[in-house]
Amino acid sequence: MAAEGERFYRVFENLDELVSVVETARGVLVSGSCVIPRGHVLDLLDDLREALPEEMEQAHAILEQRSDLLVTAEDESRRLVEEARVEAARMLAEAQDEAEQGLALARGEAESAVAAARTESSALSQQGRADYERAVTAARAEQNRLVSEVGVHQEAAVRSERMLAEAEGKAERTVTEAQTYAERAVADATGRAQRITAEADEYVETRLAEFAATLAKMLRSVEAGRGRLRERHPAEEAPGPELFDQNAAGA
């Protein structure tokens, strides 16, 4: 960094000295020219050239080579464009070949599928006709058999109706019995609940009566104790509740 600063300092120093040489040069009469020391000026210019940064020299070299670089770049771009065109043409040809092959394969598969479908359809049609004929023949035979067995079927129908009537009667009896049992069970449960409620009410009433009797007895004992205290100490103030409780407990 210090060397770079020194080089810039030399550049400005040489420029200042060149300006000073030109300003102090002896002028030529009847002319705007002047006489300067050639050797000294050339030395200053050489020193100035050496003091210039290397980047400026590189930039100057690049400027000189600009035409060559432009020509090279144009040639490279033409070459790349041509290669791209050739590659695109090749890929297009390959794609067309693959498309034609795929189309031919698809056509072959479609024709095979159509032929197989036609064969399958013909076979199914023949089988359907045969099944239809067999079904019609079997239906006619069954019809003839049923016609010949009408009497047997009538007897079976009568027996079936009788069994159905018996089943309906049994079902009605079962329903009636179930309803009767349910009503009896409800009545029993209601009676049991009423008895339990009455017993609970009676128990509560009895306990309350016993508690009331006990409380009345305690109150009578308290009043008796207070009466005895008044008889013993007629002029004194009646004792407080604590004394009443003690007397009642003693009684």
Image (cartoon, helix red, strand yellow):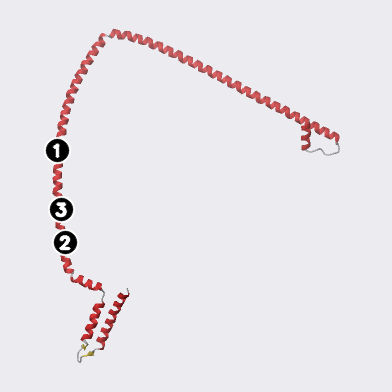
The numbered mark, 3 or 1, whose residue comes first in the sequence reads 3
Q: Give the Cα distance between marks 3 and 1.
A: 30 Å
Q: Give percent across and percent down for residue 163.
A: 38, 10
Tell me the quarter of the picture where residue 216 sits.
Answer: top right
- The three-letter amino acid code for the residue at tag 1 is Arg
Query: Which numbered disc, 3 or 1, marks the residue closer to the eye?
Result: 3
Query: According to the image, label 2 marks what residue?
Result: 76
Closer to the camera in the image, 15 or 29: 15
Mark 3 element type: helix
Q: How many marks?
A: 3
Closer to the camera in the image, 120 or 70: 70
Q: Give percent across and percent down for residue 84.
A: 16, 55
- The three-letter amino acid code for the residue at tag 3 is Glu
Query: According to the image, label 1 marks what residue?
Result: 107
Mark 2 element type: helix
The numbered mark, 1 or 2, whose residue comes first in the sequence reads 2
Query: Which numbered disc, 1 or 2, marks the residue closer to the eye?
Result: 2
Give left or right: position of 3 versus 92.
right
From this view, report whether residue 156 is shown above or below residue 47: above
Q: Give the Cα distance between marks 1 and 2.
A: 46 Å
Query: According to the image, label 3 marks what residue?
Result: 87
Q: Give percent across and percent down for residue 132.
A: 20, 20
- The three-letter amino acid code for the residue at tag 2 is Glu
On the question of residue 32 being in view, the answer is no
Tell me the quarter of the picture where residue 46 sits.
Answer: bottom left
From this view, report whether residue 91 is shown above or below residue 224: below
The numbered mark, 2 or 3, whose residue comes first in the sequence reads 2
From this view, report whether residue 155 is shown above or below residue 25: above
Label 1 neighbour load within 10 Å: few <14, some 14-19, many 20+: few
Label 2 neighbour load within 10 Å: few <14, some 14-19, many 20+: few
- Residue at 15% from the left image edge and 41% from the top image edge: 103
Mark 1 element type: helix
